[in-house]
Image (cartoon, coloured by chain):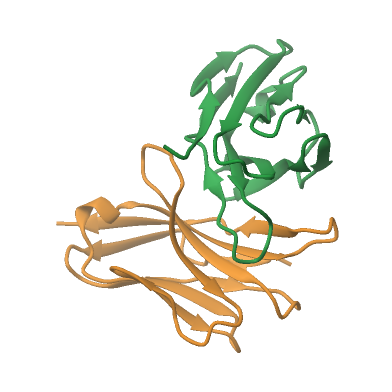
Amino acid sequence: AQKITQTQPGMFVQEKEAVTLDCTYDTSDPSYGLFWYKQPSSGEMIFLIYQGSYDQQNATEGRYSLNFQKARKSANLVISASQLGDSAMYFCAMREPHSGGYNKLIFGAGTRLAVHP
Amino acid sequence: EAQVTQNPRYLITVTGKKLTVTCSQNMNHEYMSWYRQDPGLGLRQIYYSMNVEVTDKGDVPEGYKVSRKEKRNFPLILESPSPNQTSLYFCASSPGTASYNEQFFGPGTRLTVL
């Protein structure tokens, strides 16, 4: 079974509108971390936002917020007031304990977001 | 500037010709890792290193080797590259592997094996 599922291969949004990118995860461990990364066409991986499994409040970073629903095991990224520069691939990732004695980072397949003027 | 560097950024090679992709970080991070990114599959871990001289296989280690002789460097070696190793490769480092530790990524190396 996939650990991180991003069900939207591609999304379109109009400039200045909000958009939600979906992410569901699967873990039986109570302690884990959830991350979102942005990958523009230039290829680099840019860290956006982090949510800890014990955090009571949803994480926010500027125009990015994470809609964390623990019982549903979902960690959707919300981008408010989309900008043309938000066009990129977005990856959801989870850190969870691994048999190798460390917390491994596991990635979803990604969602490609296109922002239209 | 705190960063992870990779070289080369782009490489086209032929089947069987040994190559090394270098990775270096200046943040004194203990943990380093290599990933490959393929369409529809996200990033998959190739190898990781918890510290100097401590390396272990990730999810897709076949055809790759690594070494960690110094804390800052973690080269990826393809002894006999094959076309199925054509991919985008990322080196990453983090101060530890706690659930909250962010990974810092290098700029990526786009490899084509003909």
Q: Residue at x 52, y 20 (%)?
A: B8
- Which quarter shows the C terminus of chain B? top right
Q: Which chain is orange?
A: A
- Which quarter shows the N terminus of chain B? top left
Relative placement, left or right, of A100 versus B50 is: right
Q: Say which of A71 and A64 sits in front.
A: A64
Q: Say which of B106 and B71 sits in front.
A: B71
How far from the left and from the top, in percent, is residue A13? 26, 64
Residue A49 vertical placement versus B84 (above, below):
below
How far from the left and from the top, in percent, is residue B15? 69, 14
How far from the left and from the top, in percent, is residue A103? 72, 61
Q: Residue A94: which quarter of the image? A: bottom right
Q: Residue at x 59, y 67 (%)?
A: A5
How far from the left and from the top, in percent, is residue B87? 58, 32
Q: Which chain is green?
A: B
Which residue reaches farthest front?
Answer: B28
Q: Residue at x 21, y 53 (%)?
A: A84
Residue A41 vertical placement versus A23 (above, below):
above
Q: Say which of B42 and A31 sits in front.
A: A31
Relative placement, left or right, of B106 versus A107 is: left
Q: Residue at x 67, y 42 (%)?
A: B32
